[in-house]
Image (cartoon, rainbow, N blue to C red):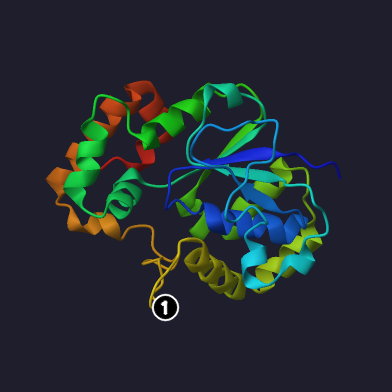
């Protein structure tokens, strides 16, 4: 089947490493990670894990093709707009911002700055993308893994039911393997895992917030990305 090279956009800590792992294993095509700075888009970007994520745990023999199927991004540039189809992995902003900026006040300041925080900007870039695109929720990826991965692989024109079922039969092993390589990529020290939830909890970091604080974060994110975009993609994260 013809490869459908795509961008994989996400804010950090949103599950893109596990997504890349699943895609590489099931398609046998490597993925790459583009720099956060603007680069010559006519060249394959150089990066510490450009050889794919599976390479980091000794599984490069699974990758039969030299063609990258995904280019991971945490930020898009105007020069890249609509160059490829896009997969956007999104996670509850109250989870990833606290996790990424360590402290809640640092995360809140990031939303309140004049420029939109990168989380909101990624969402706006996805909304304005004209080519083929698909949005994947992190929470669906961990609670309805099979159907979510199926949607991703179908989008990439690489779907094979038998391969997917074989993969899902050992999904616990694959989760553990992806956590190992996540630690490698993020430079874990003292053998301490960089993933605190181990991909098993939808809510963890935001538990430090009071109900009033959670509602305040909802308001800040609406202001950052706009009411229409918020209602379109983020309404599931709004506090009742």
Give the side of residue 240 with respect to residue 85, left or right.
left
Residue 59 position in % (x across, y down) = 71, 70
Left or right: 4 as drawn, with respect to 97: right
Where residue 138 appears, as percent x and y from the top left, is: 47, 51
* Residue 236 shows in the view: yes
Residue furthest out toward the bottom? 191
* Quadrant of residue 132 within the rendered picture: top right
Q: Residue at x 77, y 65 (%)?
A: 62
Q: Which residue is mark 1?
A: 191
Q: Is residue 150 above or below residue 119?
A: below
Q: Nearer the viewer, residue 168 or 82?
A: 82
Which residue is rendered at x = 71% and y = 62% of the image?
A: 25
Mark 1 surroundings within 10 Å by alpha-carbon count, few (fewer than 14), some (14 through 19), many (20 or more): few
Determine the secondary structure under disc 1. Answer: loop
Which residue occupies 36% across, 67% down? Answer: 196
User: Which image quadrant: the C terminus?
Assistant: top left
Report whether residue 240 is seen: no
Point out the residue furthest to the right here.
Answer: 1
Q: Residue 222, how many percent across, how many down?
A: 29, 29
Q: Position of residue 224 (x, y in %)?
A: 30, 27
């Amino acid at each position: 089947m013809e490869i459908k090279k795509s961008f994989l956009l996400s804010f950090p800590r949103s599950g893109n490493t596990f997504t890349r792992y699943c895609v590489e294993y099931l398609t046998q095509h490597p993925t790459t990670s583009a720099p956060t700075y603007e680069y010559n888009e006519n060249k394959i970007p150089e990066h510490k894990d450009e050889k794919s994520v599976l390479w980091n745990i000794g599984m490069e023999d699974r990758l039969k093709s030299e063609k990258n199927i995904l280019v991971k991004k945490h930020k898009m540039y105007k020069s890249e707009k609509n160059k490829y189809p896009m997969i956007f992995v999104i996670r509850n902003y109250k989870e990833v911002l606290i996790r990424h900026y360590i402290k809640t006040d640092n995360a809140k300041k990031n939303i309140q700055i004049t420029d939109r925080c990168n989380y909101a900007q990624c969402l706006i870039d996805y909304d304005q993308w004209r080519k083929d695109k698909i949005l994947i929720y992190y929470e669906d990826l961990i609670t309805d893994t099979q159907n979510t991965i199926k949607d991703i692989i179908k989008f990439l024109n690489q779907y094979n039911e038998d391969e997917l079922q074989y993969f899902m039969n050992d999904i616990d092993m694959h989760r553990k393997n992806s956590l190992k390589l996540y630690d490698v990529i993020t430079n874990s020290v003292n053998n301490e895992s960089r993933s605190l939830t181990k991909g098993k909890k939808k809510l963890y970091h935001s538990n430090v917030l009071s109900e009033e604080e959670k509602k305040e974060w909802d308001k800040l994110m609406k202001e950052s990305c706009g009411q229409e975009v918020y209602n379109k993609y983020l309404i599931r994260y709004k506090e009742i």
